[in-house]
Image (cartoon, grey):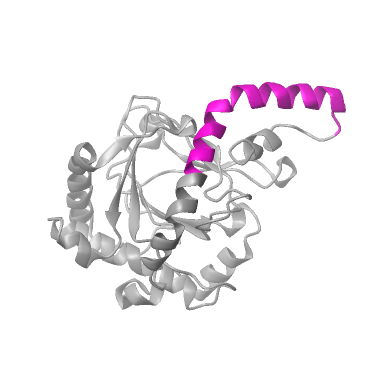
Amino acid sequence: LGALAPAWLLTRPPGRPVRLQLEELADTLDGSREAREYELRARLVRSVTEGAYNKLRPPPESLADPSVDHVISARDAARLRGGGGIDAVLVLDPEPALLPRHALAEASAELRRLVAQRTQESINPCNRGSWHGFLPLDADKAARQGLGPSTLALLRKLGALPALVSRCGWGRPLVLPPAVQLGFYPGGSGARYSPHLDRNPGEVGLKREITFLLYLNVDWDTDRHGGCLRLHPPDRASGAPVDVAPLGGRIVVFQSGKQLHEVLPCDGADRLPPTPLC
């Protein structure tokens, strides 16, 4: 039920007759069979690879970079650590930005060219139509793959962000993933990502604590292109969802196991966010 529970619980208000709830659950189980099969396969892969994968995960301090110290303050880290709904999500437009506009455009163009070479279309039924791949989070390793200077600078600065949270204390040791996930949502394809958590409650291995999103969409027009990140409150009584435009250079940070979110359809342009999960 891991892949099913968030969306089903979100849309089922309390106080409904038990018989009706059971009928709805049966229908939902039948309709979500493909998603649950995908989740089971993913858990089997994690259980087999967990030991080797964990050896590749260094502490955040290993990639610290003082040039990004202004991006996440101690107050931001405390708010994130609180994890109390949408108010705990960090939506950051740092000044100065991680990269100047021309360098961000260069990195975006290079990563778009790599989509055809190093990504594959998602087989996750909740995320159909999108393409995903991985790049080394360590810029020195990425340099050996022939990436350009703007992309390498972007990876260095992105990889340094978790250290800004870790140095303020988290309650559990944080480690970095060996790679950053590159997500690509083709414009006009209707590609989207249904409401989900980045770490499901029943996830045993590879526990993810914090999601960092960085958008590379230069000249994005939300009214024409869509593709917003929609943040859902913990329950309906907490208020309405909040949409975050995927503007180039914007960084979004939230707790992987607490913030329910989705990607709305991209109508007129390609959407490109690289994502490390610590």
Front-most of residues 109 and 258: 258
Residue stretch rendered in magenta on the structure: 15-42
* Chief SS of the magenta region: helix
Q: Residue 78's x, y, as percent?
A: 58, 71
Residue, x 39% and y 44% (percent of image)?
Answer: 246
In this rendering, the answer to whether 108 lies above or below 184 is: below
Quadrant of the rendering where the N terminus is positioned: top right
Regarding residue 256, the answer to whether it shows in the image is: yes
In this rendering, the answer to whether 175 lies above or below 150 is: below
Q: Residue 155's x, y, as percent?
A: 27, 61
Residue, x 56% and y 46% (percent of image)?
Answer: 197
Residue 22 among magenta residues: yes
Left or right of 203 on screen, residue 165: left
Residue, x 52% and y 77% (percent of image)?
Answer: 168
Residue 247 among magenta residues: no
Question: Count of labels shown?
Answer: 0
Q: Residue 112's x, y, as percent?
A: 22, 41
Front-most of residues 228 and 173: 173
Regarding residue 91, the answer to whether it shows in the image is: no
Where residue 172 sits, quadrant-wise, is: bottom right
Quadrant of the rendering where the C terminus is positioned: bottom left
Where residue 169 sits, quadrant-wise, is: bottom right
